[in-house]
Image (cartoon, helix red, strand yellow):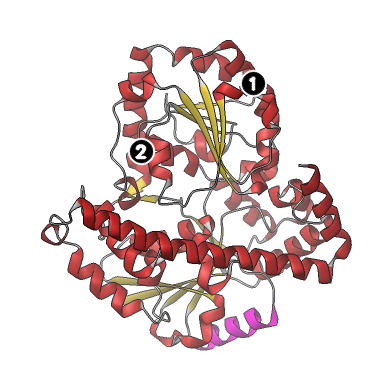
Amino acid sequence: MQKSLYISHSKRGSTLYYLDASARYRCIFPCDQKEDGHLKHCIHIDQITLIDLTQYQTIIFHRPSMSWKLKALLIKLKRLNIKAVVDFDDLLFVPQYALQNPTYLSGNMSASYAKSATKNYLKALKLFDFVQTSTEPLTAQVKAIHPNCSIETRYNKLPQSWVELTPQLPAEERFKNKVIRYFPGTSHHTTNLKPAIETLKLILNTNKDIKLEIIGDIHIPEETFPKSQFKKLPYVTYEELPKSIANSWITISPLEVNEFSQCKSALKFWESACFGVPVISNKIPDMQRLECSALLLSDNHEDWLTYINQLKNLDNYIKVSESAYKKSKDCIYVNDSCNKHNYSKIHLLMSAKFGPTWPAIRYNPTHNQHNSCLELLQKINIVENTNDITQKTIEQLTEEATILSDELFSLDYKNKKYKKLLKLKNNPKLFFTDMIKNMKR
């Protein structure tokens, strides 16, 4: 049996790496994409000493940075005749674009650190003979700086199980409540929204029946928008996103126009399109390959206004919504944990027992609950074991899952506080600069 191991280098660490969107798409989701006779596992780099590497034929390193530990590990894999692959899904490794990184642009990273980090990613990349990326522009960037490597573009895809977490709403129902939503996720995307603010303000001022909601940790001048038409809502987990997307009228994905954004994946499109929701975004090549009437790509915000006016016609909106559903099928795969029309209950049962990171536990043989997770999933992944769940049971399970989720996010919060203390120790100037910025916000 062919076996592959994905290794996440997420800065969130071995307990929290599932919360990292990049780790989910490039490490967890690929484990879900079953191939005949191919078993896949995923761990964090901190867990490398807990696993027998000789059982794998291929090991994929996601976003590694240069270190002596990495060099020693690659020497060992070469000696064992194990194929080592490096995976990048963002333009992190080209020094000349270091200051286009959204983390730097949002003020969460110093220029010196951004440049240093980029150089270390580049050094790590050049240690590998085999490379895979998430988009064609990224592949081109790798070829330019590492021409002798063997490279493959492996597009991001979404598991059907995620789509099944919430019912799909008819286009007519979404049309009645015209809510435009933006899901930035982290504060790193603050600068992506800035160029679109005036356009969004104009949209709301000229269309009193349209509302704007921004869901996530992002800093914006809220007073810019009409109070009755605007909401700023807190971050939600990845598994809570479908509910918010499914009843949206339109979602937007504004991006800074630079080389960094040109290499990004089109995941914001299919995450919305699978619920029939049209998307407005700046032009990026990975979205351009998905030609669809439900996707407006333009760096000219006047085009945004024209498109929105077109979608105010119900017949047009229904056609566009149907187009979105159809095109999203190219970007979604069916995974074996997806028992259609039943997965939301499966997810609830698993989350109540193992917490929100259970999909990562499932593929991590170093986790102390790995075997228990597999056993319970096998047991409940049949209709008979979830049909008898009553409303009372759902409420109880939801409470249990919420407790575990709150514990995890509390840990994530403490982890962020710890990083701030490290910043204070290693770079006091940047620490106090960031603190002053946050106070002004």
- What amino acid is labelled 2 in the image? Cys
Q: Position of residue 438 (x, y in %)?
A: 77, 48
Disc 1 target residue: 201
Q: Helix, strand or loop at disc 2?
A: loop
Q: Is residue 215 above or below residue 13?
A: above
Cα gap from disc 1 to disc 2, whole angstroms: 28 Å
Q: Residue at x 69, y 73 (%)?
A: 66
Q: Residue 68 colored magenta? A: yes
Q: Is residue 282 visible?
A: yes
The image quarter containing residue 292 is top left
Residue at 45% across, 62% down: 405
Query: Which image quadrant is residue 233 in?
Result: top right
Tell me the kind of residue under disc 1.
Answer: Lys
Note whether residue 335 is visible: no
- Residue drawn 80% across and 61% down? 113
Quarter that holds the C terminus: top right
Residue 429 sits in quarter: bottom right
State the SS at label 1.
Answer: helix
Q: Where does residue 52 sit, x and y in percent of width and height?
A: 43, 88
Looking at the magenta stretch, what is its main secondary structure?
A: helix
* Tag 2 residue: 274
Image check: 50 left or right of 300? left
Does residue 90 belong to the magenta stretch? Answer: no
Looking at the rendering, the stretch of residues picked out in magenta corresponds to 67-79
Is residue 127 or residue 52 the one in the foreground? 52
Circles 1 and 2, Cβ within 8 Å, touching? The answer is no
